[in-house]
Image (cartoon, grey):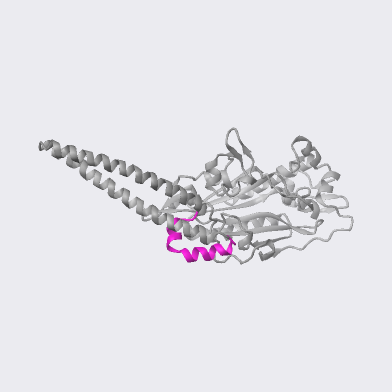
Amino acid sequence: MLQIYFIRENKEEVLKRLAVKNFKDADTIITQVISLDAERRLLQKESDDVKAEANVLAKQIGELMKSGKKQEAETTKARTGELKQKEKQIDDTLKAKEEEMQALLVQVPNLPSTVVPLGKTPEDNETVFEHGEKPTLPATAQPHWELTTKYNLIDFELGVKLTGAGFPVYKGKGARLQRALINYFLDKAIAAGYMEVQPPILVNEDSGYGTGQLPDKEGQMYFVGEDKLYLIPTAEVPITNIYRDVILKESELPIKNCGYTPCFRREAGSYGKDVRGLNRLHQFDKIEIVQIAAPEKSYQILEEMREYVAGLLKELNLPFRILKLCGGDMSFASALTYDMEVWSAAQKRWLEVSSVSNFESFQTNRLKCRYKDANGKTNLCHSLNGSALALPRIVASLLENNQTENGIKVPEVLVKYTGFEMIN
């Protein structure tokens, strides 16, 4: 959530940057927010003045009673009662104004960084790096949904029977490949200085609000109504919320966490050829990396996280490219996002496997995640996260790109985790 003082002091800059995100109601909402903030501050001053007067009179009552001026003391006491009633009325109005302003603020997305490209659709994203040669497959090459059936790796129809579409069942070497990738990604993250955590996969409303999934993505999350809990769309939510309502020491920053969880997304409205097989699921496995950082270092850390994910893709020998997302393709909470896409040789298309984002203080303002600097001043931290990596499309590309006449070759870095070199 944007900080109100920044909106108040930088209205034109806020509107200019929100236009990069194509936020249509920016002018109306920002104007209303500033107006409500002005009313709120006037009410706060009025409330403070009434409190101050009441406190002065309260002291006078005792002195008047001591000096025997009972009638004057009673008059003063009555005035104090009137002030208390007035204070309550003002505070009730103030609370209503604050709630009205808060309801508007949560509708406003994060401001994009000044380096975010202009654009409205994924076609407007900027390619900043490309690595590896796209493999040339024989005409008989198959997409992964056929390979998984051929080698008995994943049963999509059984998943439909057990739960519904988008909930596959991994079997045999398919299940072992999943486990191998999870362990490989976790080991790499730990070696890079991330502390592993195993968080819950159900979170409360406060957690969803803290990282910006609520109220923006409420319709995309699975909700357990009786308990008012949400199945997590990403480990970003519980891991980042570890630091909700926490004041850190500057010396503790950056904090680096990683975690494996299953993830759940309703993906309402998704259909067509681009969602076949592993391309888009309702349940999938992912390893997330999260950092809590000092503001002046967060963009350097973002570049380091981007390079870290790129290193994983290089070790897996997957052709990939890195995109800097345009304003129209960015998430609600992000200030700058890089997407990593791998080449799917049989489908002949790029598949997104990771997003690495800097949220600046947007999430931490909601979370009240702060740190004390060397001067003892309390500041908001910056939060960052990234997929490192999401498994489904990694598996799809590994199977398609490495298929041979004799089976599917497992990348060398995974062999010690899988225990086999070929899937046949």
Q: Residue furthest top?
A: 226
> Where is residue 391 drawn, in percent x and y?
70, 48
| Image quarter (top left, top right, bottom left or bottom right) of the C terminus | top right
Q: Is residue 254 visible?
A: no
Magenta segment, which residues?
1-23
101 and 225: which is toward the camera: 101
Residue plotted at (72% across, 51% down): 413
235 versus 74 height, above or below: below
Q: Residue at x 23, y 42 (%)?
A: 79
Q: Nearer the viewer, residue 255 or 122?
A: 122
Q: Position of residue 97 (x, y in %)?
A: 43, 49
Q: Is residue 62 left or right of residue 270?
A: left
User: Was residue 3 drawn as part of the magenta stretch in this picture?
Assistant: yes
Q: Quadrant of residue 92?
A: top left
Residue 327 part of the magenta segment: no
Q: Position of residue 147 (x, y in %)?
A: 83, 48
> From where the camera sits, is residue 18 visible?
yes
